[in-house]
Amino acid sequence: MNLNDYFEPVALEKPEESFRFNDALFGRNLQIHTPSQPIGEISDYQLAIIGVGEDRNSANDGSSKAPDQIRLKLYELFRVHEKLRIIDLGNMKHTGNVSDTYFGLRDVMIDLMNNQVTALIFGGTQDLSQGVLMALEAVNQSVSFVSVDSRIDLENGPLHAATWLTGALKLKKLDLCAMLGYQQYLCDKRQLAQLEEQACEVMRLGSFRANPLLAEPLIRDSAFVSFDIGAVRQTDAPGNRWPSPNGLQAEEACQLARYAGLSDHVGCFGIFEVNPDFDRHNQTAHLAAQAAWHFVEGFSQRKREVPSPDHPDFKMYLVNHHDMEHALTFFKSEVTGRWWMEVPVMQTGGSRMIACSAEEYQEACNHDIPEMWWKAFQRIN
């Protein structure tokens, strides 16, 4: 496919300050789609930046302006690694209706995935996640994603920024759905019950704050991370139509973005719902750009690890449990310190490796079956 048919060239005003022309800046260390430099062979790149200025299926009017604001602030940061091959594809062309945008994004994502290119999306509103999920379902045998949000978008009705999660849970190939950073007073208990019924992983804001490392395994096993900037507290991200005085801190948002970058499964990281009309001194665009930078920084340090009892970089732990016929098996990487647990697949007699943390191993040692193990077992079987 010709990606030039899907994107408008990047058009940004040049910054006035002379120091912004430093050769080490992010904006001077990537390929940019311009009228004089069309998009070439996409497989030449590792990362692709995509702007999608779409807000027609949301009450968050104004978020369509966000991609260029985030892009500008990202360009002003310093590069991550001089050898990273990054291209900014520009903003997707405006379509006649929202459905065309979803399908266009699906087509673009399929092309990127087929060429092993990781996507960094600047929205636009979070219903754009639909386009990414359609691409994952078309290309992969299973769909796994994480939504970082203060609210649970499980309202009833047609596809919308407040309902997109409803459709996502109906995907035939859905394997893992995780909800991170939700605030219980902003969520209907029936929505939480619905997520629990489908063995989805949920982590409220307080639980994340108590131990941020518990979020890393969920992100590590996901193919797509959809980040609603509304998950961040108002003092750190005022550029949102529905801000909350509570939420993730700016540093925590960047930490989650870095986790996504480090995961060799994550093929797309999207930042949504930034609204420049409500921003102060471009503070929220700055934060979104810095979160994107941390994603790229994590990406530059990816290490593909496949746990195996025969691999010298992994240590295997067997934990016997009186309620189980077989021991629970855990693996720890001696290189990164990351943990996995083995979950049986009853239909085939085989097993699957599920990312976990040291806490799950400690639970097993205390003669408790980890909740994460049970949920994974339910999803798989």
Image: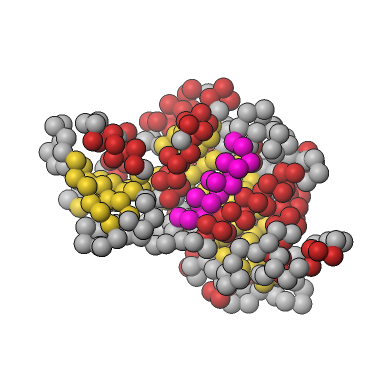
Q: Quadrant of the N terminus?
A: bottom right
Q: Position of residue 377 (x, y in %)?
A: 28, 40
Q: Position of residue 19 (x, y in %)?
A: 81, 64
Q: Quadrant of the C terminus?
A: top left
Residues drawn in magenta: 248-263
Q: Is residue 316 left or right of residue 290?
A: left
Colour scheme: secondary structure
Q: Nearer the viewer, residue 142 or 89?
A: 89
Image: 343 above or below 136: above
Residue at image coords 14%, 42%: 326
Q: Is residue 343 magenta?
A: no
Q: Position of residue 92 (x, y in %)?
A: 68, 60
The image quarter containing residue 280 is: top right
Residue at image coords 74%, 59%: 76
Q: Is residue 224 visible?
A: no
Q: State the residue lying farthest toward the right.
A: 16
Q: Is residue 337 left or right of residue 119?
A: left
The image quarter containing residue 34 is: bottom right
Image: 184 above or below 142: above
Q: Position of residue 251 (x, y in %)?
A: 60, 43
